[in-house]
Amino acid sequence: MMDVRRAGERYPGGDPATGIESWHAFSFGPHYDPGNLRFGAIIACNEERLAPGAGFGEHPHSHTEIVTWVVEGELTHCDSTGHETKVRPGDVQRLSSAAGVRHAERNDGPSPLTFVQMWLAPRDPGGEPSYEIVPGIADSTPYAVAEAGAMLHIRRLAAGERTAVPDGAYVYVHVVRGAVRLGEERLAAGDAARITAAVGLETVALTPAEVLLWEMSG
C-alpha cells in the first residue's frame, strides 16, 4: 500500500521573521494530528530553511535518533557532548540523543541553508548520547540506524535512470530535488510516499533527482 503526501500538505512552522522557515511532514509542535504521528520508526521529517545568521539556539532532545541531510549551504552543529561540526551537502549527520542531550544548529555561512531532518524512535530508549558524521556518502553505501531498525538509502539519479525501492515492512520515500515516478505516482521535490509491505517497486527519474529512501523493519 502506498500513501502519497504532497509538499503542499506539510505543516508550516519556524519563525520567518527571524529567518527560519520549516515544513513538517508529521504531527509537530502546535500542528497536532493524532492520525499522523509516525510511520514505521519515523516520527518527523522536517525541511528547514535558514537565512544567513539564523538558527536554532541550544535546546534539548531525548530518546530520538536525529538524521540530517543538507540540501544546500552549510550547517553548523554543536552539542553538549562537545561536538562542533560543519555539515555540507552529501554528508550524513546523526545525533543519538539517548537519555538526553542539548544541541544548537545555525547557518553561519553567507548563503541560504536548506536541510532535511528526520527523527526516528529508538527501539530501546535511554543510554548514552552519541554523534556521527559521514562526509560525502556514496549512493552505493546505505547508512544504518540500528537503534531504530532502519536503513537510509540515498539516490542521486540522472534523468531516465532507474533504481529499485528496497523491499521492506515500511519504506519512506522523500524527494529532495527533481521529479520521479514511483510506481504509478509522479513525485516532485518535497513530496513523499509511505509504503507498507513494499515489494518489487522501482523509481524512475523524470529529471535529474535526489531521493532519500528509508527501509524499516516491522
Image: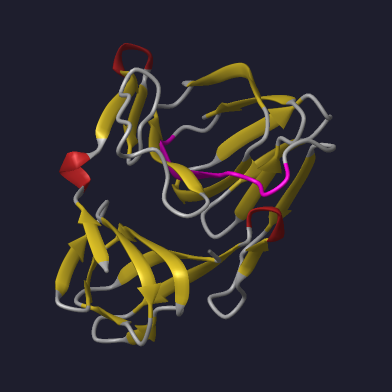
Task: Say left or right for 76 vs 74.
Answer: right
Front in this rendered view, residue 39 or 174: 39
Looking at the image, residue 159 lies above or below residue 212: below
Q: How was this image coloured?
A: secondary structure
Q: Is residue 201 above or below residue 36?
A: below
**Residue at screen point 53% across, 21% down:** 56
Residue drawn at x 30%, y 18% as measured from the top left:
16
Q: Quadrant of the N terminus?
A: bottom left
Relative to 54, is 68 above or below? below
- Please tell me how many numbered marks the rendered image carries: 0
38 or 87, which lies in front? 38
**Residue 175 placed where, x, y %?**
32, 60
Classify residue 208 by image quadrant: bottom left
| Image spot of residue 79 (x, y percent) | 73, 28
The stretch of residues the image draws in magenta is 111-124
| Residue at 42% over, 66% down | 171
Tell me if 170 is positioned left or right of 133 in this view: left
Q: Is residue 110 above or below residue 158?
A: above
Decide if residue 68 is on the left or right side of residue 82.
left
Whether the magenta-drawn stretch holds residue 79 is answered as no
Q: Is residue 119 magenta?
A: yes
Closer to the camera in the image, 148 or 117: 148
Give the percent coordinates (x, y) of residue 64: 63, 38
Residue extending farthest top: 17
Query: Picture quarter containing residue 9?
Result: top left
Residue at horizontal 78 percent and vertical 35 percent from the top: 126
Please provide percent x and percent y for residue 104. Answer: 63, 24
